[in-house]
Image (tube, rainbow, N blue to C red):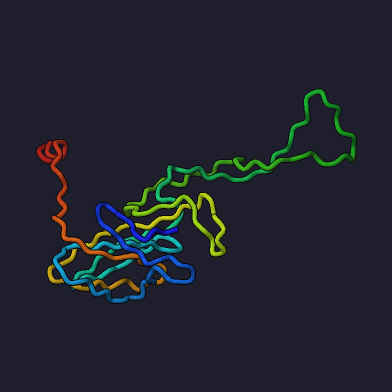
Amino acid sequence: MLPREISFAGILFKLAPADLGKPNAITAHGQTITLPPGKYNRVYLLAAATNGDQKATFRVGGKSVDLTIQDWTGFVGQWDDRIWKVTEEQIAQRPGAPAPPAGAQPPRTRTNIYGEMLGLRPGFIKRADIAWVASHRNAADGRAEAYAYSYLFGYAIDLPPGARTVVLPDNERIRILAITVADEPAIIAPAHPLYDTLERN
């Protein structure tokens, strides 16, 4: 399902072909990736994790950078969600119906999946930038799994002067699908009148 190229915020990632039986991602095991020659100050990673979000430390030159590589599936945000206890409820007899004879079957019941509210699961939002999304995925046998959302995320790391390598974390749950470099101006937060007012007060 993956394309050969993904454009993310003006950055182009080139992916390995996703032919059957050929790997197209790196499992992070502390490998050292040599960056290409040229002038650049930022490296971009196209990555995702399996079995939950993963904390990771990348090394660029002599600098360590901590990132959270987000899970490739599941929700990236969610409102507060009520937690329910399932209960069994007796089905009331219809008004005017004759009383059941002695020794009749026990009263009928039904399952109520919203029987009792136990609490709230707090809402959340994950912050990694989504570089690619799919509304379904294919299982290993090729069968489509509808509404199984899948994501790849884009991560930017500023490079210290002279850095020419990226050392991946040692975490087998992290997958790197592409790496590219860019020469970009420093990111500066724009001035905002509200911020100026707050600072003056």
Q: Which residue is at 39% across, 48% downward? A: 124
Relative placement, left or right, of 34 versus 22 is left
Above or below, comparing residue 153 to residue 113 in the picture: below
Looking at the image, residue 200 lies above or below residue 28: above
Q: Identify which residue, 95 or 66, lies in the foreground.
A: 66
Whole-percent x, y for residue 65 in the image? 24, 65
- Provide residue 52's location: percent of width, then percent of height: 43, 61
Residue at 34%, 59% (x, y): give it: 5
Residue 45 sits in quarter:
bottom left
Residue occupying the far left of the picture:
200
Relative to 147, is 140 above or below?
below
Q: Is residue 200 left or right of residue 47?
A: left
Furthest residue in direction right, as rendered: 102
* Position in image of residue 176 (x %, y %): 35, 66
Looking at the rendering, in which quadrant would you find the C terminus?
top left
- Count of numbered tags: 0
**Residue shown at 34% from the left, 54% from the top:** 131
- 28 and 118: which one is in front? 28
Q: For this rendering, which residue is in front, 70 or 11?
A: 11
* Residue 155 relative to residue 152: left or right: left
Residue 162: which quarter of the image? bottom left
Residue in the picture at 50% in, 44% down: 119
- Figure check: 141 above or below 188: below
Residue 55 place in picture, x, y as percent: 34, 64
Quarter of the image that includes the N terminus: bottom left
